[in-house]
Amino acid sequence: MTSDLYKILERARWAPSGDNCQPWRFEFLDEDKIRIHLLFDRGNVYEGSSGIPTWVAAGALIENIRLASGLLKKKIFIDRVGDFVDGKGFVDIRFEESEMVYDPIEKFIESRTVLRFPYQLTDLSDNVILSLQRSVGEDFVLDWSISFWERLKISRLNMMSSKIRLTMPEAYKVHVKIVDWDHKFSIDKLPAGSLGMGKVSLIFTKFAFGSWRRIAFLNKYLCGVFLPQIELDFIPGIFCARHFRMYFKSSDRIWTAQDYIRAGSAIQRFWLTASSHGLSLQPSFSPIIFEKYVKQKHEFSVSKSSVSAAKRMAKFMSRISRHPLGNQVFQGRLGYSNRNENVTGRSVRIPLDALLMSLSK
Ligand SMILES: Cc1cc2nc3c(=O)[nH]c(=O)nc-3n(C[C@H](O)[C@H](O)[C@H](O)COP(=O)(O)O)c2cc1C
């Protein structure tokens, strides 16, 4: 059985995680039981105050485990979820033999990827839309932004979020850590070529990343935020088929780690289904996190202007949302693209052996 679990984890580790941080390590507890250890990096401003992105990524990982288990005729049960204590949490998964039906979206576990460049404008057919709506299940609702004006509004939201991100030292600290300038395929970071920037912007960004003082200078005197806003938010925000926002369907309440795991699983099914239809996808998670900081009155930065900008962004976000913002779990854009991430760069994964806390196979 353990060699089966090894095979399942080998496949499941291709789950997406914020900035490819892969906040998980695996421990074999028994013949048919594993513990997923989760690490909430509290020094990362994009993790929010409760590590929601880590729970969402864990949900995506668990969905991959479920799909890969189906291939080996097993089903899974979540036995226990341990919320974060001192930045450490866990999920226990039990496996049982079963005659489960194989789900063909499993085939896309490894090829599913984020694409941060502009897409074609061609919209999705009714069949594809229906299949995407079904993929998230009964507990979640999808809201689409399709027309030019709607795509413009979401682009504006993403530009507002970039302004916050690019003008605060806390986010700079994260950015310098996560970009891999040396590899086209990075095992635990984002290759520079996958960021969605052209060659000139990359040279400029690499120079700016040299120190926070350089960034502050460029922001103050050379509109340093404007170019990335245009290249990374405005143009791709317009050049796509549509934007999506995903919400919990039931009424607004305090959502728990278990709820965000369910959301992560639904997001992964949605993303794999999109891949199965040949669609590219890019999430945009930072507005969700910044809005939560504002709601919690959490001073997330020493930069007063970033905190004020987040308040303005949250106001705009509530104006354009058709559902309670507390229920939102994900957002991003979708579309068709001829680009191949193997040319520009792709985040790959940490080898499984390095993710195992116990090497008993
Ligand atoms: C919770 C979560 C939030 C994410 N937020 C963003 C985002 O705001 N912008 C972005 O470009 N990618 C985002 N991503 C995508 C990850 O950066 C990406 O999945 C990861 O680097 C691995 O690359 P891959 O998806 O190509 O395998 C997010 C992924 C997850 C799971």
Image (spheres, grey):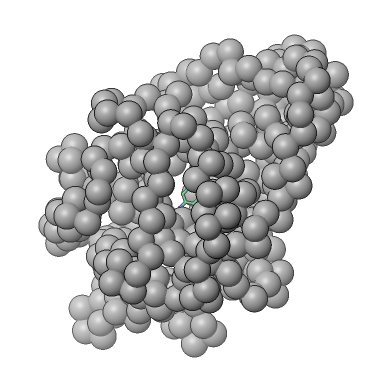
Q: In this view, does 46 lie above or below 137?
A: below
Quadrant of the frame with the C terminus: top right
The reply, left or right, for residue 161 in relation to residue 134 is: left
Q: In this view, does 136 lie above or below 187?
A: above
Of residue 182 and residue 275, the one placed in the foreground of this image is 275
| Residue shown at the point (26%, 43%) measured from the top left | 323
The reply, left or right, for residue 217 in relation to residue 69 is: left
Q: In this view, does 226 lie above or below 353?
A: below
Q: Indicate the position of residue 329 as horizontal and vertical percent values.
A: 38, 41
Quadrant of the frame with the N terminus: top right
Residue 262 visible (yes or no) = yes
The reply, left or right, for residue 205 in relation to residue 60 is: left
User: Which of the 4 image quadrants contains residue 228?
Assistant: bottom left
Q: Indicate the position of residue 112 as horizontal and vertical percent values.
A: 65, 54
Q: Is residue 137 above or below residue 197?
A: above
| Residue shown at the point (25%, 76%) measured from the top left | 219
